[in-house]
Image: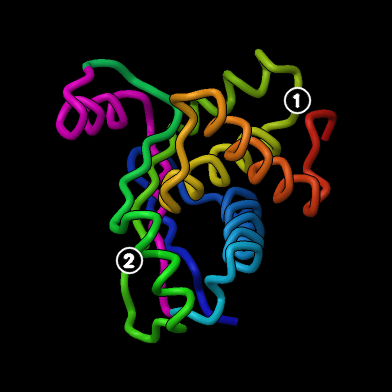
Amino acid sequence: MKENCEIIYNGIDANENYEETIKKVVNECFQIEKLEKTNLYMSITLTIPEEIRKINMKYRNIDRATDVLSFPMFEQDEIKQLIEENYEADDVLGDIVISIPKVQEQAIDYGHSFERELAYMCVHGFFHLMGYDHMVESDKVVMRGKEDEILNRLHITREG
């Protein structure tokens, strides 16, 4: 099976459980969105609040830590074209940065498992890479529906 993502650790120790969850989610995302026949891949950096804050400031001019950042390399219509053409060149779909301490905090705040919150951050970041957003309610409904479909297919629920 081809590797759809590279996992990078910045400020935290490598963790097999994180990698297992991330790869499972990313592979499902690639399958559902018909990217498995392309040679697109993505990076996911797992980090700490101080580092994600620096990245947020540098690229978005927002001086605060957040839970997840996504940096897409293509527009939504470009991705659709790449899928239709069974794009074969190795290329980066985009980069996602996730704050692991924020994932832990939100899992507790929302009353569900760490795995569920990490999976949600991955799928949420992935759909941003695919060109989806949640700034307007109609777009939010579409994006949330896609996120829920992936998590439900993987049986990663809020209770899990």
Q: Earlier in the sequence, mark 1 or mark 2?
A: 2
Q: Quadrant of the C terminus?
A: top right
How far apart are labels 1 and 2 at the CA level? 32 Å
Q: Residue furthest front?
A: 138
SS at mark 2 in the image: strand
Residue at left 31%, top 46%? 71
Q: Amino acid at mark 1?
A: His
SS at mark 1 in the image: loop
Relative to residue 150, is residue 85 depicted above or below? below
Q: Amino acid at mark 2?
A: Val
Residue at left 45%, top 36%? 133
- Report the span colored magenta: 39-62
Q: How is the image coloured?
A: rainbow
The residue wearing badge 1 is 112
Question: Residue 61 in magenta?
Answer: yes
Q: Name the disc covering residue 3, or none.
A: none
Relative to residue 94, is residue 155 depicted above or below? above
Residue at left 68%, top 40%? 145
Q: Quadrant of the N terminus?
A: bottom right
Near-viewer residue (85 or 122): 85
The residue wearing badge 2 is 92
Res 108 → quadrant: top right
Crowd class of label 1 (few under 14; some 14 to 19; many from 20; radius 10 Å): some
Q: Position of residue 106 (x, y in %)?
A: 60, 20
Question: Residue 50 in magenta?
Answer: yes
| Image-based side of 72 in relation to 129, left or right | left
> Which of the two discs, 1 and 2, sits closer to the camera?
2
Residue at left 36%, top 24%? 49
Q: Position of residue 138 (x, y in %)?
A: 56, 29
Near-viewer residue (19 or 1): 1
